[in-house]
Image (cartoon, helix red, strand yellow):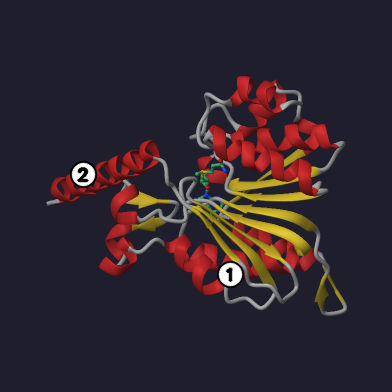
Amino acid sequence: MKFEDIHARVGHVPFIAKENARILYDLILRERPARILELGIAHGTATCYMAAALEEAGGGLITAVDLLETAATFQPSAEEQLERTGLSKFARVVRMQTGYTWFLHDEIARRTRDGACEPEYDLCVIDGPKNWTIDGAAFFMADKLLRRGGWMIFDDYDWTYRWDCVEDNIDGITQRSLSREELETPHIREVFELLVRQHPDYGDFLRMERNDWALARKTGGGDKTYTLVYSETTPDLFAKALRKVLRRLRGLTRSLRRG
Ligand SMILES: C[S@@+](CC[C@H](N)C(=O)[O-])C[C@H]1O[C@@H](n2cnc3c(N)ncnc32)[C@H](O)[C@@H]1O
């Protein structure tokens, strides 16, 4: 399915912005991944864009994983959106009781022969709780399942509990139990800068500031090129400053409400 067609069908449903969806769609057409692992799916909107790209590319399968407990929260559901767009055959939705790290456990166990894990995926999108412990572990686990040459994409590079999250409890993490540093530090940034970039098998790093995305390729070693695509137009800079002010206001309001 063409990009504009899938966008017309699911573009109004959160959480992926059109620009990010386009990047993902084009990456799939360019790289032709046969197997995609999506960790954190919500309404399955990104899943639908990826499924449309797979259909256009001639086939492939997305394994899309989320929490069992949030299945009813996200309406329309991923299954409904896939059904409505006629793209169900390109995705398998898996819902786990405690989250994707246990799904990754099961996958690694299933793919292990003679003490080694046989990789299965060509692209992995990590877009879940944005938490150091969960997503840091998820990176190392997903790495075992990612083929050489495959891509790892992280959303929410700059997201923080303090400035971006209004709930006290999100994805099983209670903010009151976090230190000030943990609240104010972007966890995905730390995962990307400290774990992914230092990993000997990863390179071709790409950080898209405006999109809040960070990408890395499993090169198998060698080139550690880091490209930063940053916001440079006046409207971009203005939107970024405005977002920052709004985030801080939200965080402040929440702190005041809590007393
Ligand atoms: C931002 S949404 C994903 C959006 C989706 N990738 C898109 O772009 O359309 C984050 C999702 O991560 C899920 N999530 C959070 N913690 C999780 C965990 N430990 N395991 C699995 N899913 C988790 C949430 O239930 C939520 O659906």
The front one of 108 and 250 is 250
- Mark 2 is surrounded, within 10 Å at the Cα level, by few (under 14), some (14 to 19) or many (20 or more) other residues, namely some
- Residue 213 location (% of width, % of height): 53, 51
User: Percent x, y for residue 256?
Assistant: 13, 48
- Taking the spot 24% from the left edge, 44% from the top edge, the residue there is 245
Q: Residue at x 67, y 33 (%)?
A: 48
> Left or right: where does residue 103 sit relative to residue 177?
right
Residue shown at 46% from the left, 46% from the top: 210
Label 2 lies in ligand 1 vicinity (Cβ under 8 Å): no
Which residue is label 2 attached to?
249
Q: Which residue is at the front of the view, 16 or 231? A: 231
Please determine whether, in this image, residue 234 is positioned above or below residue 212. above
Type of residue at label 1?
A: Val
Residue 38, horizontal then vertical, whole percent = 65, 49
Q: Residues within 10 Å of mark 1 (few under 14, many from 20)?
A: many
Q: Amino acid at mark 2?
A: Leu
Number of the label disc, if any, that sits on residue 75: none
Q: Nearer the viewer, residue 129 or 98?
A: 129
Kindly identify which residue carries mark 1: 196
**How far apart are labels 1 and 2 at the CA level?**
32 Å
Circle 1 SS class: helix
Mark positioned earlier in the residue sequence (1 or 2): 1
- Residue at 74%, 63% (x, y): give it: 146
In terms of image quadrants, where is residue 83?
top right
Relative to residue 239, is residue 163 depicted above or below?
below
